[in-house]
Image (tube, rainbow, N blue to C red):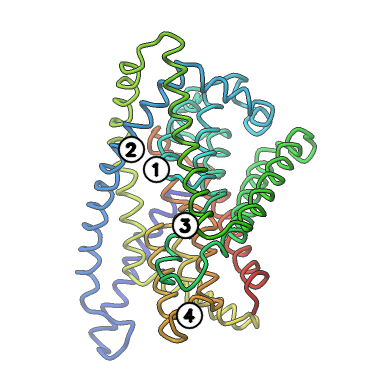
Amino acid sequence: MALNYLFVGFFLLSFALCCVRAAVGIVWPEAAFGNPEIFNLAIKDTFDKAEAGFTIALGYAGVFTLWLGIMKVGEKGGVIHSLGKLVAPLFTRLFPGVPPGHPAYGAMMMNISANMLGLDNAATPMGIRAMEQLQTLNNEPERATHAQIMFLVLNTSGLTIIPLSIMVLIAELGQGTVNPTEYFIPILITTFCSSMAGLIAVSIVQKLRLYAQPVVWAYLLTVSLAMSGLAVGYTHLGSQDQSVFTSIFAGGTILGFISWFVWAGHRKGINVYSTFIEGAREGFEVAIKIVPYLVGILVAIGLFRVSGGLDLATNAIGWLLQAMGADPQIAEALPTALTKPFSGSGARGMMVETIQHQQALHGLTEGMKTIPSRMVALMQGSTETTFYVLAVYFGAVGIKHTRYAVTCGLLADVVGFIAAVLLTYVFFGS
């Protein structure tokens, strides 16, 4: 129901704001807030976002076709089952409603692994496959189960080992004057904080008592030590070696999985190509199925932004922070933080705009090193786009009642943003 209230709220609030801005623009033309053309802009943006939603879904068709075909080969070749056994001790405690040995275990592990490697194009179809497997256990097809919500929140919190897209963007904006690997450890810690917040929030709602599970602590400790070792080793590499390592570690891992799937299927005696085609057909169907969900959420969010609602929220929070005596530089990073849960591309644009503004004030190199520039980079890498992930994953299986998924996902976002602010000062000074 939370998504329904947000959807309705976005439209009604946006319409009210458009009325106010149009009236102000007519009565007081000099006022910056007024705009007599606001309704034309809102309608244009509505159609643009509807087209964008269809275009995004259509763009996913090829990726979904490839990866769901590969996943089908992995399932029939027994690889998914083997991967599921590897994480069964942990997943049986995180997802108690999923029977041991269920195919969803392997698919969820593949999705989480791809997310950690920063491979979004691979992670999304794997996540949809996992959600489809979880849906087979759902007695109320339009209502999200506990397991589906836990899985979705772990996705929206966005634990990432290699924040490749952020590092590439930093390198481009800095034009070689800054080392993008400076962001590696802070983003790693930030995403870990948001993921733990999401995990804890969902476990409290579901009364899982994970704190009393030694197996959960053992897995978390192992992952933490592995990430720490990777971070330390990574920072000791030269910039060129870091680039080579990232390419081999991320790309090599995924290609290795694909080869393993194909080999396992051939070894088991299945027709690998026919099995791939069988799964690939499902990929195209899923891409078409998510169109209404993507269009709906993108239009609602876009309308809220065009109406000025997002700017008002940003200004209000910035004023509140300054009234509390907080560093006014934090306010400059707020547009990225508030946009991130709604639009990944929008947040990326806000990040670029903030950094370029800092460069205009302080120069190319020094502008990259200011607190607002550092902060928006960490915020951009802190979590996934909550509403976008929710629309795609739940939309793929026809879930309409999201229950507490939005609340827990946004809580993880907030923790991620707070961690980004604090870690900016810890790693980059005041």
- What is the spatial separation of the Cα atoms under label 2 and label 3, in whole angstroms? 23 Å
Q: Residue at x 52, y 43 (%)?
A: 249
Residues under numbered marks 4 and 3 in contact, where contact means CB atoms less than 8 Å apart = no
Picture layout, residue 61 above or below residue 313: above
Residues under numbered marks 1 and 2 in contact, where contact means CB atoms less than 8 Å apart = yes
Q: Does dot 1 land on a helix, a strand or a loop?
A: helix
Q: Residue at x 50, y 74 (%)?
A: 373
Q: Percent from the top left, x then y, of residue 44? A: 20, 63
Amino acid under label 4? Gly
User: Which one is earlier in the sequence, the residue at label 1 or at label 3?
Assistant: 1
Give the labeled residue for mark 1.
121
Query: Disc 4 or disc 2, which is closer to the eye?
Result: 4
Give the labeled residue for mark 3.
341
Amino acid under label 2? Val
- What is the spatial separation of the Cα atoms under label 1 and label 4, in whole angstroms? 32 Å
Q: Residue at x 54, y 54 (%)?
A: 410
- What is the spatial separation of the Cα atoms under label 1 and label 3, in whole angstroms? 19 Å
Query: Disc 4 or disc 3, which is closer to the eye?
Result: 4
Give the labeled residue for mark 4.
367
Q: Does dot 3 land on a helix, a strand or a loop?
A: loop
- What is the spatial separation of the Cα atoms under label 1 and label 2, in whole angstroms? 7 Å
Q: Locate the C terminus by quadrant.
A: bottom right
